[in-house]
Image: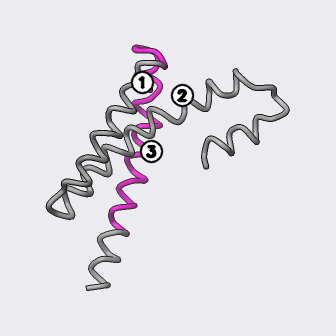
């Protein structure tokens, strides 16, 4: 049913936004201060991998959604750290280009 699918994905992406807000707003900085940037990237890669495998194997839409939340958490550990590292590696005149390429 198209209506139920639309409702599910609408709710799913609402939860994605909430997870992004919570991780970015309350978890990332304390974790970075406690563990450092490199362990956060490693944890993020592990979480993304776990989430992608979980999505592929999810027998229900709810387990698929839970696995997606794991992917989102992993992303929130990887992307701020790599963006920060990227800006220290390139000349300030190409920050926008470098960060844009990272996002693509």
Instruction: State the residue at coordinates (54%, 33%).
Output: 80
Query: Is residue 63 covered in magenta?
Result: no
Of badges 1 and 3, the one in the foreground is: 1
- The quadrant of the picture occupied by the N terminus is bottom left
CB under 8 Å between discs 2 and 1: yes
Label 3 – label 2 distance at C-alpha: 16 Å
CB under 8 Å between discs 1 and 3: no
User: Dot 1 lies on which element?
Assistant: helix
Foreground of the two, 36 or 102? 102
Instruction: State the residue at coordinates (60%, 46%).
Output: 103
Most extreme residue toward the left, as rendered? Answer: 59
101 lies above or below 55: above
Of badges 3 and 2, the one in the foreground is: 2
Predominant secondary structure, magenta span: helix
Label 2 – label 1 distance at C-alpha: 8 Å
Pointer 3 residue: 21
Foreground of the two, 32 or 70? 70
N-term mark: 1 or 3: 3
Where residue 97 sits, quadrant-wise, is: top right
N-term mark: 3 or 2: 3
**Badge 3, how many Cα within 10 Å: few under 14, some, many 20+?**
few
Where residue 102 sits, quadrant-wise, is: top right
In this rendering, position of residue 81 left or right of residue 52:
right
Which region shows up in magenta? 10-37
The colour mode here is: one colour
Label 1 – label 3 distance at C-alpha: 17 Å
Pointer 1 residue: 40
Q: In the rendering, at what x and y percent does residue 79 appear?
A: 52, 36
N-term mark: 2 or 1: 1
Where residue 63 sits, quadrant-wise, is: bottom left
Most extreme residue toward the right, as rendered? Answer: 93
Instruction: State the residue at coordinates (32%, 51%).
Output: 68
């Amino acid at each position: 049913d198209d209506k139920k699918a639309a409702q599910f994905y609408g709710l799913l992406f609402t939860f994605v936004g909430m997870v992004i807000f919570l991780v970015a707003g309350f978890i990332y900085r304390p974790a970075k201060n406690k563990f450092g940037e490199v362990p956060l990237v490693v944890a993020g890669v592990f979480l993304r991998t776990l989430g992608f495998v979980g999505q592929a194997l999810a027998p229900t839409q709810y387990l698929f959604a839970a696995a997606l939340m794991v992917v989102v958490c992993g992303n929130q550990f990887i992307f701020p750290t790599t963006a920060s590292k990227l800006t220290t590696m390139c000349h300030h005149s190409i920050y926008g280009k470098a960060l844009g390429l990272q996002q693509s």
